[in-house]
Image: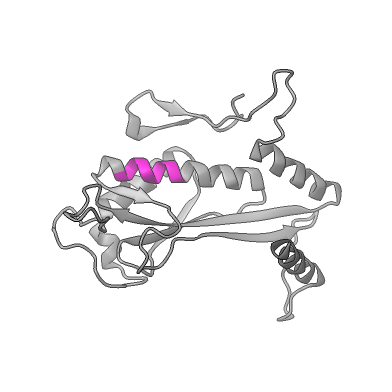
Amino acid sequence: KPIPGTLVPTPWAGEGSAQFLVDFYELDGTPHDLDPRHVLGLVTDRFAADGLTPAVAVELEFYLVDPKRARDGSVRPAAPGYSNDRPRNVEVYGLRELEDFRPFFDDLYAFTDAQGLPLESAISEFAPGQFELTLCYKPDVLRACDDAIMYKRVVKAVAQAHGLEATFMAKPFAEQAGSGMHIHVSMNDAEGLNLFASDDPEGTAMLRHAIGGMIASVGD
C-alpha cells in the first residue's frame, strides 16, 4: 500500500512523473512481518510507550565512477565534463573536487528540494571521486530512513543523467577508502530533551546503557 506523504515528483524522468514508497501487507491486511518499515515501527512504538523518541540523521558516502570501463575492464573514477583528467589523489574536504562536478551537484540539490528531502552539506571524501552528503537530523526514524532510501535513488538518477554512475557499494576499490553509511542517533524525552547529551565526557547513564546494548548485540 502507498505510504502517505511519500508521493513526490521525479524531475529526471520527465514532466508529470512521480514516485511513492509502499508498505507490504498480507492478503488479510495485516502488516507483513518481514517489511523493515513495520519492524522499525514496532521498535519506535516500544520507545513511545516509555515516553521516548529516537532521533536520527543519515550520512551516505558514494563514488562517482565512469560508466565506461577501462580497457582492462576495471572501474575508474569519473572525469569532470570539461576534462579527461580523472581524480587520482586523496583531496579530502577539497573544494575543487566539488566544483569539478558542480552540474551534478546543482541538479542533485534541485531534485532533492523537489522531493522535500532535507539535504545538507556536501564534502569530498577520503578517496578520488568519493563524496558524502548529510540528511537533516529529525525525531522521526521512519521518515529519516525513507529519506535515505529516496536520496540514494535521486543520486543514482542524477548521475545517470550526467553520463556518470554513482555507487554506494561498501568497498568498490580494494586500494581506496570504503563508503560508509553513518547513522547518528540520540534519544529524546517527551519534552524533546536529548537524553544522551551531557557535559560529562562519559555521557549520561542512558547513553552508556545504549552503547553497552549495541556492544552486546554485536557480540551475539
- The number of numbered discs placed on residues in the rendered structure image is 0
Q: Give the answer, above or below, for where 218 lies relative to 198.
A: above
Q: Quadrant of residue 193?
A: bottom right
Q: Is residue 206 left or right of residue 114?
A: right
What secondary structure predominates along the stretch shown in magenta? helix
Which span is picked out in magenta? Answer: 152-159
Residue 83 at x, y = what percent? 13, 58
Residue 197 at x, y = what percent? 72, 70
Q: Give the residue at the far front of this rendering.
A: 72
Residue at 74 percent across and 80 percent down: it is: 200
Residue 124 at x, y = what percent? 36, 65
Q: Give the answer, above or below, for where 154 lies relative to 167.
A: above
Q: Quadrant of residue 208?
A: bottom right
Q: Is residue 149 left or right of residue 71?
A: right
Q: Is residue 109 magenta?
A: no
Q: Is residue 86 left or right of residue 31?
A: left
Residue at 42 percent across and 52 percent down: it is: 168
Residue at 31 percent across and 46 percent down: it is: 159
| Quadrant of the rendering where the N terminus is positioned | top right
Q: Give the residue at the far bottom of this rendering.
A: 201
* Viewer-proximal residue among 7 and 129: 129
Colour mapping used in the image: one colour
Q: Give the residue at the far left of this rendering.
A: 83
| Quadrant of the rendering where the C terminus is positioned | bottom right
Q: Give the answer, above or below, for where 41 lies relative to 215.
A: above
Residue 162 at x, y = what percent? 25, 44
* Viewer-proximal residue among 85 and 113: 85
